[in-house]
Amino acid sequence: MNPAEFDNIARAERDFWWFRGMRDILFAMLDPLARAQSIQQVLEAGCGTGYMSKVLAARYGWRMTPLDLGWQGLAYAREYGLQRLVQGDIAALPFPDDRFDAVVSLDVIVHFPLGQEDRAMAELSRVLRPGGLLILRASALNILRSRHSQFALERQRFTKKRLVALARRHGIRILRVTYANSLLMPVALIKFRIWEPLTRQPPRSGVQPASPWLEHLLYAPLKMEAGCLRRGFDFPLGQSLILLGQKET
């Protein structure tokens, strides 16, 4: 990821509408599994600032190991008081086989060049114990690639079919997979495919403060999606993909 984005994320990820909404969506899917499984040791592979590791530890009582390639994010994680920080590459994880009860990786594999995502998935599966839980999120659909995608150095996006195939190739049994951030997709298409090219917008971060009324307006659809997902409804299209899987025994 572009190192310049760490500062933007650190300023925004607690309160910014997208981060709040995507946490709601993830928890709607994850809560039933987290309660049903015995999970203690958890790796966040590509933790960024570490804020999500902090949230997961507080919500579920998990013992988190936050790992990131860049020192910029880990510096923030240290400020959050997180322990067991590791600087490393998710395509060459510095852990033994079957080390973790769960592995979390959010919006990380999209930064691998097309064709190299298997290197990362092989490692995520390797360090996960048999029966362990994989929690994976990835940007979806090439048509939704934006100026923010370029700024963040996103190198690929996934379809549901391709993400499922990737996980299965590395011994992951699919528990649930769905598109997310779906209700705002028409707005995204207009912005990314019409407005940004028409106005010749340069690559730049999309993590920018918004007025309170706009924050509320954009957060509301994500909150609604979280409610639908909690009731078992999956979305057929969206700007993100969330996959929950279990390593085959």
Image: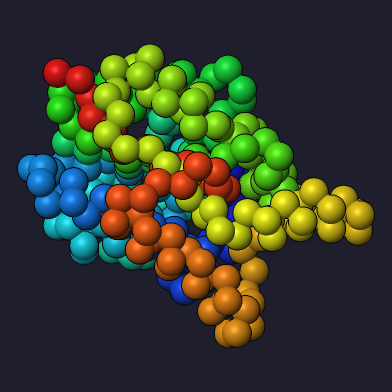
In the rendered view, tell whether residue 154 sits above or below residue 82: above
In the rendered view, tell whether residue 22 sits above or below residue 178: below
User: Could you tell me residue 185's position as x and y percent?
Assistant: 63, 54
Which residue occupies the foreground of this view, 24 or 54?
A: 24
Q: Residue at x 68, y 56 (%)?
A: 186
In the rendered view, tell whether residue 216 sits above or below residue 102: below
**207 relative position to 119: left or right:** right
Q: Residue furthest top?
A: 169
In the rendered view, tell whether residue 101 sits above or below residue 50: above
Q: Residue at x 49, y 26 (%)?
A: 161
Number of marks in the image? 0
User: Could you tell me residue 120's position as x and y percent?
Assistant: 43, 25
User: Could you tell me residue 29's position as x and y percent?
Assistant: 30, 51
- Give the image quarter of residue 114: top right
**127 relative position to 192: left or right:** left
User: Could you tell me residue 183's position as x and y percent?
Assistant: 56, 58
* Res. 163 in view: yes
Q: Residue at x 15, y 27 (%)?
A: 131
Q: Residue furthest bottom?
A: 212
- Give the image quarter of residue 56: bottom left
Q: Residue at x 62, y 75 (%)?
A: 209
* Res. 63 in view: no
Task: Indicate the quadrant containing the C terminus: top left, top right, bottom left or bottom right.
Answer: top left
Q: How is the image coloured?
A: rainbow
Task: Indicate the quadrant containing the N terminus: top left, top right, bottom left or bottom right.
Answer: top right
